[in-house]
Amino acid sequence: MLSFTRRTFSLTLAAGLAFGTLVAGATTAFSADKITVGALRFTSHAASFVAFERGYFEKAGLEVEFKFFQAAQPMAVAIASGDVDFGVTAISGGLIGLASKGAIKVVGGALQEEPGIDGQMILVSKKAFDAGVTSPAKLKGHSFGITQPGSSFHYMAHKIAQKEGFPGSDIRLVPLQKVGAIIGALKSEQIDAWSIVPHIAKGLAKAPTIELIGKVADYIPDYQVTTVFTSADNAANKRELVEKFLSAFSLGAADFNAALVDTIAGDQAAEAMVKLIHKYVYVDRPYEKAAPSIRNGAMRINQNARLNLTSVKDQLEWFKSEGLADKDVTIETVVDSSFVETF
């Protein structure tokens, strides 16, 4: 885990985002709110990195420290325990369970599948491919890597099975706890399949032992892949703090989308964005080798942290149907929809 801290001295943040959450006025180092933000070292978490590096958190009166995780569920636990104030990651059974206990709330949207933009991809080992697993329809009876039961990987595997007309139980799930462990297992052909964001998937697909066989968007249209969440206490009692975070996060997302998704900011802005993200993603690689993978991960991050509530409801219903969430959990238990636009 690495920490990065930035202090603010005398800056002003102007109001003006579409959802109007910024609080105008001068902030000083003495009034800055210290927060810890949970993240994964994925391009899809770039909005937080951009907001930090470009001073958007500073201007909002936030002093930010990052804590890095290797899976979604531990981050949800860290939010509930107070070790982390805000997280950006996929909805999981653990997150829903903590929400049902009044510990955490989803307050916004982040990464989303969108037609025309490369999203999460379905991969198989070359061994499985040669044995006939040449499309997602052929995953029946084969192994699929996940971090934990109740993770987004679990959800994706079952939604693929559902659309292909066979029970999710016909895919053998292999919990490996960490993304890195799944990558290793797929490369070494210890598991047959996995689905993951494009900046990882495209790189892996170049390996001689891995094949690309499909896209998650074909099975879960408009999937709200990641959400912004915080403690229930923050959502209920520290509204201004949540608004500040969402505002700064949204500015970071806007820069990211303009540079790498919509490519309207120009080549220089795109290059600068990739260099910024490289401080957090693929840090163990030289820039020249990391840059293509970072560019490949440019999925849409929702404008103004808009939340696809329809997708979140579908996810909740699936978790309930699998016994991974209590049947009486409602969407209102999980989501506080008062902070951002929902659709």
Image (cartoon, helix red, strand yellow):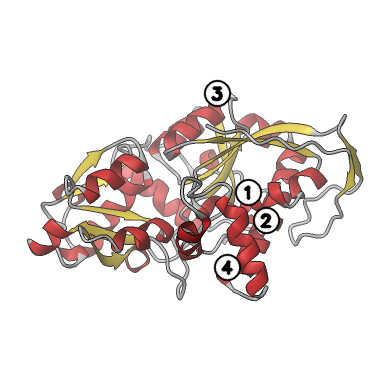
Q: Label 3, on which residue?
A: 81
Kind of residue sitting beneath label 1: Phe
Whichever of callouts 3 and 1 sits on the residue coming sooner in the sequence is 1
Q: Residues within 10 Å of mark 1 (few under 14, many from 20)?
A: many
Residue 99: give x, y in percent of width and height. 50, 34
From the viewer's perspective, is 98 left or right of 254? Answer: left
Residue type, numbered disc 4: Leu
Figure check: 160 above or below 262: above
In front of the other: 190 or 327: 190
Q: Nearer the viewer, residue 71 or 293?
A: 293
Q: Which mark is residue 252?
A: 2
**At x 13% / y 57%, what residue is drawn?**
128
Residue depicted at x 60% and y 74%? 263
Of circles 3 and 2, the one toward us is 2
> Disc 1 vs disc 2: Cβ atoms closer than 8 Å?
yes
Q: Which amino acid, by three-letter code, is at mark 3?
A: Ser
As drawn, the label of residue 49 is 1
Neighbourhood count class around disc 4 (C-alpha, 10 Å): few under 14, some 14–19, many 20 upward: many
Which numbered disc, 3 or 1, marks the residue closer to the eye? 1
The earlier-in-sequence mark between 4 and 1 is: 1
Q: Residues within 10 Å of mark 3 (few under 14, many from 20)?
A: few
Task: Quote the CA–CA distance across marks 3 and 2.
Answer: 27 Å
